[in-house]
Amino acid sequence: MPQALIAFLTPWRDPAGRFSWLKTAVVLLALFPAVELALGAWFHALGGRPITEATHISGDWIIRFLLLSLAVTPARAVLNWPRVIILRRLLGVTAACYAVLHLGLYIYDQKWNLIVVASEIVLRVYLLIGFIALLGFAVLAITSTDGWQRRLRTRWKKLHRLVFPISVLTMLHFYMQSKVNVGDAVIYSGFLFWLLLWRALPRRWQPRLAALPALAIGAALLTAAAETLWYGTATKIPALRVLAANLGPDPRPAAYVLLAGLAVLGLALLRRLRRPRLARAI
Amino acid sequence: MLFHRRRGWEIPERLATPESVVVSRRGLGIAAGAGLLAAAGPARAQWPFSAAKVVEAPRAPLVSTKNEKFTPGRALTDEAEATSYNNFYEFGMSKSVIAAAQALKPDPWSVEFAGMTGKPGKIGLEDILKRVSLEERVYRHRCVEAWAMTVPWVGFPLSELVKMGEPKAGTKYVVFTTLADDKTMPGLHQSFYPWPYTEGVTMAEAGNDLSFIAVGMYGKTLPKQNGAPMRLVLPWKYGFKSAKSIVKVTFTDKRPVSFWEALQDSEYGFWANVNPEVPHPRWSQARERLLGSDEMVKTQIWNGYGEFVAAMYDDLKKERLFA
């Protein structure tokens, strides 16, 4: 059996081939949405249009696993947690698997009428964007193995940097499919902003605690800006009213993103308190 | 060739109880076990692990005469489906607004006449009901999101409500306003939306035979999530035109800007008549999915009600009638 297939079939093992609790936990997380969907279908808990609902649920999980996979590298540096890197491929491949399921559900929803599926993908820009992202996911998942890593050598890293444009396309697809209200999409894009901003930091700043408050605020501001821009251009809602809502009492996407950024700061602090030697990296 | 011999316990598919009914029975079992059944309406298909079951207020039966003029040509949608898949943005952006919608208080209820009216002020729903006779009409309902249902509405012609409001000469439009109560409606916290929900029709449309005010469905009063206690039903237009939980009827000579039009007029216009040939910017309107059976059927122009409504638009060809 090829090495890659063995690795794929035994996802709970670390690269050295030993059982890993960390990976096992993430494998269970990766299976959770599939179980959720299967039970939902079995118990008819998916509502009047179950396939549409399942398509949406699978879509949400693509975004979550994609963002988690992008969070691995920052987590390694910020939390000084080298071992977390063994999760990156697993999380990325999981996102890709749910992307395939997502398209499969859409095709099923169209009663396997591939002509309708193809024409809808071409005619509706948000579907075209989603489809391109899906192709990207597929390429990255297939070339994620050790074998392809060896074969492509330095080009592998370049190829897999495609995950950033793919993330942007995925997020755009999320925004565009929303019916006016892009609240959820805005929150997730805020997390993506944090992850991209962190990567834009100078290398020596990336592991430092002092960068985190700025990142949290920066990501929140970008979130508010993106939300304002979206409503201002894609809808007739006055942009200023959207911006002003951030000053109101109700929880807004930018506030959630700020909170998440501060939570990262909290985790990093905790980690340094428990391991004082790290504290020098402030 | 394959033969399927029917065994004694098997029945043909068409005689089988719809799944949703079975599921709601299962739900009932669970609810009963939890002692929640005290005054429960039908419990619904629910995520089996969800702690809180939705307990709906019981709905009073309504006496009405059947109006058979508008035959739907389709099977009725299962009641459990038609009352659990709802767009009611005041109670949330998802389709599962049942739980949140239970906060609505449909009794007592009154409707205010405003604008170019000879009867400004409020009228109680019970007073309205004293002056009309209820009828049941089965209409096809087509949502702009390309799903559809077939519902037996109980109510009275919209023209009767308009008459009660005594619109003055020169009135061109009737505007309907949905309740906006920020204490019970969490959706209103989306502060940049143009609340309250408003929708409007021309006087000609309001006077059309098909235009209907529903106070019930499936022989009982309206469920809260479907727009209790009174809502509009305009079966040849996309569903969002049919405002729910109406608290105000305004007569005006100026064309109103409705809720969705104010949000995104490119996708949801003033006229919003059903037309399979005119796609929504993000999806085709050529076909629709029936709630419950998930069957896909072809969408018809004017949602198949052309013989009753098409003539109204003969002189309006320049308008964006189908979006």
Image (cartoon, coloured by chain):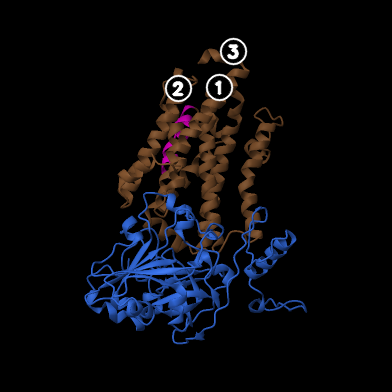
Chain colours: A brown, B blue
Q: Is residue A163 visible?
A: no
Q: CA separation, marks 3 and 2? A: 18 Å
Task: Find the magenta span and give its range.
Answer: A154-169
Q: Tell me which corner region of the image, top left, top right, bottom left or bottom right, holds residue B321.
A: bottom left
The image position of residue A49, as x and y in percent, is: 54, 63
Relative to residue A176, is residue A148 drawn left or right?
right
Q: CA separation, marks 1 and 3? A: 12 Å
Q: Are marks 2 and 1 in contact (CB under 8 Å)?
A: no
Type of the residue with mark 2: Ala
Front-lying residue, A121 or B271: B271
Type of the residue with mark 1: Leu
Residue A191 vertical position relative to residue B7 in the rendered view, above or below: above
Q: CA separation, marks 2 and 1? A: 12 Å
Q: Which residue is mark 2?
A: A211
SS assignment at label 2: helix
Residue A132 vertical position relative to residue B75 in the rendered view, above or below: above
Q: Give the letter of the chain under mark 2.
A: A
Q: Which residue is mark 1?
A: A269
Q: Which residue is mark 3?
A: A277
Q: Is residue A155 magenta?
A: yes
Q: Give the letter of the chain under mark 1.
A: A
Name the residue rendered at 54%, 82% in the picture.
B63
Q: Are marks 3 and 2 in contact (CB under 8 Å)?
A: no
Considering the image in quadrants, where does the N terminus of chain A appear?
A: top right
